[in-house]
Amino acid sequence: MGKASRYKIHQKLISIGDDYWIENEDDQKAFKVDGKALKIRKTLIVEDAEGTPLCRIQERMLRIKDTMEIEDMEGKRIALVQKALIAPFRDRWTVKIRSGPDLIVQGKILDHEYTIREGLRRVAEISKKWFKLSDVYGIEIDPDQEDVLILTVAIAIDMMVHD
């Protein structure tokens, strides 16, 4: 089994119209998030470090639940991120994956302390406790996961919660 990937995101930089970098654990720029300000719906484009667009995070309008869609660059859905209507003790979100098992996101979302699970198996952890700076949170992704997918799920949830 390989080593987990770790990334850090500056939470105050996540806003429509802004561009920002997701850095790896060695403080190298790994992914760029391009906020599209001219769209009616909230839209972010995630690019690799060389500027190649990888996927799009987009708000879905006219839904009962808070919903964000993650699409490939041809507009095909990769994942649909939705807030659960009823979650009695902790925040709970579901992620419907097009080509794989669905994911459950649960924990203290507002505090950036939560896990992403596939069934009972943890696939990623999001936490602020790894950093001294209060506006930074980390994402640790298990080695058998698609980093971009997990990062975009965390960004989509952050956009919905901290709007």
Image: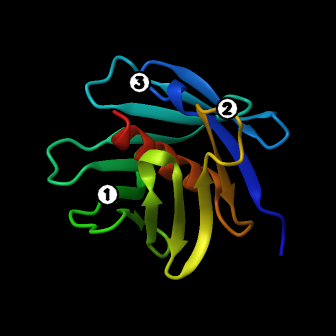
How would you rate the neighbour count of disc 2 (Cα within 10 Å): few for under 14, some for 14-19, many for 20 or more?
few
Q: Is residue 19 above or below residue 33?
A: above
* Residue located beneath label 2 in the image: 133
**Which residue corresponds to the image point at 74% horizontal and 66% vertical from the top-left?**
143
Of discs 1 and 2, which sits in the foreground?
Answer: 2
Say if residue 66 shows up in the picture: yes
Q: Locate residue 158: give its quadrant.
A: top left
The image quadrant where one finds the C terminus is top left
In the picture as drawn, the residue positioned furthest to the bottom comes out as 120
Instruction: From the viewer's perspective, tell me whether residue 141 is left or right of residue 66.
Output: right
* Residue located beneath label 1 in the image: 82
How would you rate the neighbour count of disc 3 (Cα within 10 Å): few for under 14, some for 14-19, many for 20 or more?
some
Gap between marks 1 and 2 measured at Cα: 29 Å
Return the residue nearer the eye: 69 or 141.
Answer: 141
Amino acid at pointer 1: Gln
Residue 32, position in %: x, y?
63, 31
**Which residue corresponds to the image point at 61% horizontal and 51% vertical from the top-left?**
127
Q: Earlier in the sequence, mark 1 or mark 2?
A: 1
Instruction: From the viewer's perspective, tell me whether residue 104 is left or right of residue 8.
Output: left
Amino acid at pointer 2: Leu
The image quadrant where one finds the N terminus is bottom right
* Residue located beneath label 3 in the image: 16
Instruction: From the viewer's perspective, tell me whether residue 73 is left or right of residue 146.
Output: left
How would you rate the neighbour count of disc 1 (Cα within 10 Å): few for under 14, some for 14-19, many for 20 or more?
many
Say if residue 74 shows up in the picture: no
Q: Do the residues under discs 1 and 2 have CB atoms within 8 angstroms?
A: no
Amino acid at pointer 3: Ile
Q: Earlier in the sequence, mark 3 or mark 2?
A: 3
